[in-house]
Amino acid sequence: DYSLKVMDHFSNPRNMGSIENSDGVGEVGNAKCGDIMKIYLKVENDRIADVKFQTFGCGAAIASSSMATEMIKGKTLEEAWKLSNKAVAEALDGLPPIKMHCSMLAEEAIHEAINDYLKKK
Amino acid sequence: DYSLKVMDHFSNPRNMGSIENSDGVGEVGNAKCGDIMKIYLKVENDRIADVKFQTFGCGAAIASSSMATEMIKGKTLEEAWKLSNKAVAEALDGLPPIKMHCSMLAEEAIHEAINDYLKKK
Ligand code: FES
């Protein structure tokens, strides 16, 4: 079953939504389940000033994106790039193995959003 | 991509939540993705007086449960039993093939909840 932290971030997700005039956007799809994740970044002085996510994915995708966005807020782009879905799952006190692929969505969308920012710059 | 009806029922789900002192509860899991669906029924004179759902599932599971609960509200138990996930998907103007299994959650949970009601009676 799901940890209390997963249930907390699922029932009360942090940073859900979009950012107008964002500096970078990343959108990825999950081949395994067909779900989509979108990450919006606001960057200031090479740091993540703000971040929001939108998803059609399941509770595990919502909880891990909520946690992942909390973990990269205020961090440098380099630090944010290094955040792995494993670290996110650990911060959530674990995810069922069948749900690990859901946490990949946030990691990949963060990478896409950082790439998008660097490309635009 | 998703139809306007899917996006509407996903962004603004009908009948989400639980019913205190419900007359029947059905809970099912999805072997394919590990998600859970729970349906609560209030029954009066053999009709579904009220119905609510809770899920950890993805946007397609939310949209199809929202639509399915709308479709069985006020119906007899027999009519509700006959609601198929295919009919729900059609009412939503279709679901991507990879997402059809998500709509099974609502159909199965409705069956479980009706069985639970009949058992308790
Ligand atoms: S099952 Fe698709 S994101 Fe979890």
Image (spheres, coloured by chain):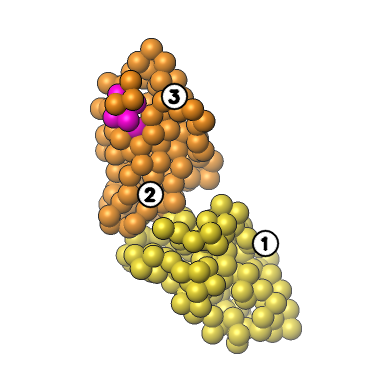
Chain colours: A orange, B yellow
What residue sits 60% from the left and 85% below the top? Answer: B79
Image disc number at residue B87: none
Q: Label 3 belongs to which residue?
A: A42
| Whether residue B38 is visible | no
What residue sits 60% from the left and 54% below the top? Answer: B12
Spot occupied by residue B93 in the image (x, y as percentages of width and height) = 50, 69
Q: Nearer the viewer, residue A21 or A90?
A: A21
Q: Are marks 3 and 1 in contact (CB under 8 Å)?
A: no
What residue sits 54% from the left and 84% below the top? Answer: B82
Spot occupied by residue B25 in the image (x, y as percentages of width and height) = 57, 70
Is label 1 in a helix, a strand or a loop?
A: loop
Determine whether B107 is above or below A50 in the image: below
Q: Label 2 belongs to which residue?
A: A36
- Counting residues from the start of the chain, the first of labels 2 and 3 encountered is 2
Q: Are marks 2 and 3 in contact (CB under 8 Å)?
A: no
What residue sits 51% from the left and 38% below the top? Answer: A17
Q: Chain of mark 1?
A: B
User: What is the crowding at mark 1: few (fewer than 14 residues within 10 Å), some, or many (at least 20)?
Assistant: few
- Residue type, numbered disc 2: Ile
Which residues, given as a range, are shown in magenta?
Answer: A113-118
Whether marks 1 and 2 lie on the same chain: no
- Residue type, numbered disc 1: Glu
Q: Are marks 1 and 2 in contact (CB under 8 Å)?
A: no
Q: Chain of mark 2?
A: A
User: What is the crowding at mark 2: few (fewer than 14 residues within 10 Å), some, or many (at least 20)?
Assistant: many
Label 1 and label 2: CA atoms lie apart by 34 Å
